[in-house]
Image (tube, helix red, strand yellow):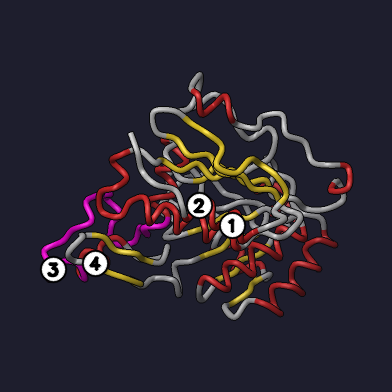
Amino acid sequence: MKNADSEKDAMNTRAPSPAAGALAELERELRSCVRGEVHFDRMSCGLHATDASHYQMMPACVATPRDEADCIAAVSAAGRCRVPITPRGGGTSLSGQTFGPGLVLDVSKYMDRILELNVEQRWARVQPGMIRDLLNVQLAPHRLHFAPDPATGNRATVGGMIGRYVHDLGSGLMVVGGEKTFGDAVFHDTPLERLLPVTAAAAATETERSVLAMVLIIDRSGSMEQDRRLDLAKEAAQQSVRVLDAHDKAGVIAFSDDAEWIAPLATVADKADLLQRIATLTAYG
């Protein structure tokens, strides 16, 4: 019979676990800044080590944020401690996308509400843990319906469904990562790809710090004028900028028939200016 440590090691053979010192620091930070539950015990981590796939990986810890502020605090703390993050919804993935070796952020317990519903324009703003079928129950009296229809709709979350779409199809608002993140994918051999900072390197003064390099890619084509799509994209981009620290890097690319830097990738020295550049984007093409 294997002991608990050997079982844990076997489950993590394909991904290195964070250093013990980093986890100790992360636990202190999470318990001081997150109002939702924070778990480092083996049972809670084990419950988040599987999904609907046949894969397994024991996370180092689990947090169940109560709101957006909790998410921002947890992500910031994990970044400072250099611990990887995996967001998790209903755990319905068939390919093991809902767990990892670091911090699992489970949004399904508390972040499951509709925040705003515009019946006239037919859109809703929801928290990522909103279950697809429960969303449609609340939309039905208004003769509205969220169309994606997975077999797991009674437990799949909207955040997880969108995350899978971005991951599998390469179609999303944000591209987040460092110098080796951007490969040959949906933007291969396009004006947009040629603008991406594939060789960007951190400055020497930042080598001892945890630096997030984030490129926000916003579709500003004419179709984005429908149903406030561009407004919603700009709002999401601005929320992403607001969580960055002063030593992080951010850039904004807007594309329609062509692509251009709205704000070149650089250290976030003037966050207000970056937010204003996003706010003034208009659709064309």
Q: Nearer the viewer, residue 57 or 184?
A: 184
**Rendered residue at 80%/68% (across/down):** 25
The part of the chain drawn in magenta is 138-159
Q: Secondary structure at mark 1?
A: helix
Identify the amino acid type marked 3: His
Q: Nearer the viewer, residue 270 or 27?
A: 270
Please indicate whether residue 143 sits to the left or right of residue 210 in the image.
left
Identify the amino acid type marked 2: Ile
Q: Which residue is mark 1?
A: 241
**Rendered residue at 75%/67% (across/down):** 26
- In the image, residue 147 lies in the stretch drawn in magenta: yes
Q: Secondary structure at mark 4?
A: strand
Counting every numbered tag in the picture gives 4
- Cβ atoms at labels 2 and 3 below 8 Å apart: no
Q: Disc 2 and disc 4: Cα gap in Å?
A: 23 Å
Q: Which residue is mark 4?
A: 118
Q: Nearer the viewer, residue 111 or 273?
A: 273
- Cβ atoms at labels 2 and 1 below 8 Å apart: yes
Q: Nearer the viewer, residue 86 or 3?
A: 86
First reached walking from the N terminus: tag 3 or tag 1: 3
Q: Disc 1 and disc 4: Cα gap in Å?
A: 25 Å
Identify the amino acid type marked 4: Asn
Please indicate whether residue 271 sits to the left or right of residue 239 in the image.
right
Local packing at callout 1 (Cα closer than 10 Å; few below 14, some 14-19, many 20+) is many
